[in-house]
Amino acid sequence: MSVSTQADHVKVQFSDIESINVYSEEDQASTVSEKYNRFCLCCQRKLFICLTTSFPFLTWILDYEWKTHLLNDFVAGLMVAVMHIPHGLAYSTLGNVSPIHGIYMAIFPVFIYAIFSTSRHVSTGTFAVICLMTGEVVNDNLKIQSNRTNTSTEYSAIEIGAMVSFTVGIWHLLLFCLRFGIVCSVLSGTFISSFTCGASIHVFTSQIKELLGIVVSPHYGIFGLCYQYKDIYLNIHKINLKTFGMSSVTILFLSLLKYTIVPIVQKKIKVRIPFELITILIANVLSITLHLQHHGINIVGKIPSGFPAFTSPAFPLFLKIIYDSFFITLVSYSVSMSMATMFATALNYDIDGNQELLAYGLANVFGSFLQCLPISSSLSRSIIQQITGGKSQIASLISCTLLTIVLLWTGPFFETLPRCVLAAVVIVSLMKMYMQVTDILKIWKLSKLEAGVWLGTFLSVVILDVKFGLIIGLILTLIHVFIQNMKPDVKLLGIIEIPARMRNDTSDEFAVVSIDEKYATEITGIKIIRLSEGLIFATMEHIKNEIYTLSGVNPQEILKTKRRMKRWKTPPEEVEEIEETLTTTNFKLESSITSKGFGFVIKKDKLKNLIIDMKSIKHIDRNGLNLIKTLIKYYNEINIAVYIISNYKQFIYNESVDEVIKNLKNQYKYR
């Protein structure tokens, strides 16, 4: 090579290197800018996720349909506020505090809960069982104070009750930090039913003295209920006939309204009649007119108007009540989560168990500084909030606003209300809780083991005590879970075609086997899933997720997408196209060898039929039964037929998977 040629070659190489370097600098600048933009976008997304996770109301308030939903939420909030008045006045007496504190509980903690909660329909505030358990703690500490010689630091009933609320809130927050929301999958509907039914017997017993107008000291602890009835029997001769007469008339009047008149009227006007509030207003007018307090009938007494003073709870009692407060925390959370889960499942939205712990924790801590007892959810109020059109927690905020008006101006009006009327309201309001005793008959037919858990928990609560019953019920529930296995096997099945030379006159054309077997193939448009072991409350979430994963179709997500698109007024053909895409089972990359070599082919199949083989299920409870019914409903709504292979009478009986496949033979082809 000549010198000139070498020089030219070097110049070319140098030119290439220079151009490459120039390009690299521009590219580097562009990359830095893009990275910075991506970083900012990522930070914004993380901040938004953080805010919506901590403040769930930001999630639904952005999509809130003010024109259509606000009126529904206002009506629901109004009806719930009307229910809060009798419930607050009546249930707070179970906590050994003045009735006005029940109204406080329906305002201040509820406002905080509505902001931090993920549930849209539960109505929080007073709950009979929680107020009763709080009343036990209040009474125990008042007894200890009365037996002490040093009375320099005496606390009132509401100071003790507010401290219980504070401690319960701290427990909620501690469990939130420990991510204890998983507890909602361990506390079954059977446990909640038996526990609340047993606790309602304690509530009923605590109101007998008010109904009869006698003075009886409360008894708590083991066999406390037995001692309570013994004292009632020994003091029955001191009965106040006027009080007893008014109690009897009130119970009859409430029952007549609730079970006879109201159902007939509601068929015509479609609006819930506040019969408890009507009864209280009538009784109060009679009390004012006839001066019942001068005839030996106990009345509510002084009720202050306006907001309560912002005061700190009795912090020195923290260690003394921390043990009892833990049980109140468990009951409050488990009852509330069972209700929240029920509404979320029925209305197809998700709730976060850990976020609910945060919401209840902050609500109870805040309420404790405004003379509130611990709050929980009420099934009756929650149902009213839902059936009257409530769409979100804005209904609760409206309820708080309306109750604030009641608190500011109408509180003293209820000072002359007879206490026996409040006792009658409590007893009639809890009628559904008493009737939960019939649940054991239904459970017995479905599962003897689950019925044993129900009966054991119920008897422990009634005979021993609420706290001991809670412990025994939890132990029985955990044993039940351990026996039935928490994560049953869920398998996807396929078929193996049997060659003609290997068949006889009676054999089938195919065999149903696990999809993992060699030569096993799936059927176009059909998914076969086999369940085994137990289908119970603790396994239902796992089984549901496995069915969604193995079938490749999540009907809840599809239904939510369709509703969202309908709200956005998307054309029907586009909605159908989206549904067609979403009901397509998971894309499969299948290897193929062509004349051009080894490659991949993407295959898609629209799911048309889902076969769930449950013949290997050894145990199913009510929660499992409801799950299957819900799955059938969801899949049918997106035009996917579900076939249940089961020996249980609750389902349409199919002899075998083979039989169903033969009936669908014209609808499938081998891959």
Image (cartoon, rainbow, N blue to C red):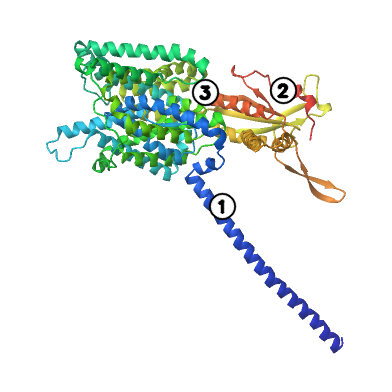
Pointer 3 with pointer 1, Cβ within 8 A:
no
Q: How far apart are marks 1 and 2 (CA)?
A: 48 Å
Q: Residue at x 41, y 23 (%)?
A: 194
Residue that badge 2 annotates? 660
Looking at the picture, tell me which residue is in the foreground, 458 or 156.
156
Q: In the image, 345: left or right of 82?
A: right
Q: Residues within 10 Å of mark 1 (few under 14, many from 20)?
A: few
Percent position of residue 629, x then y: 59, 24
**Residue 45 got which mark?**
1
**Residue 237 got which mark?**
none
- Residue 3, located in which quarter of the rendered image? bottom right
Q: In the image, 611: left or right of 145?
A: right
Percent position of residue 8, x then y: 83, 84
Residue that badge 3 annotates? 622
Classify the position of the C terminus by image quarter: top right
- Mark nearer the N terminus (2 vs 3): 3
Which is closer to the viewer, label 3 or label 1? 1
Which is closer to the viewer, label 2 or label 3? 3
Q: Distance between the residues labelled 2 and 3?
A: 26 Å
Q: Which amino acid does label 1 sit on?
A: Arg
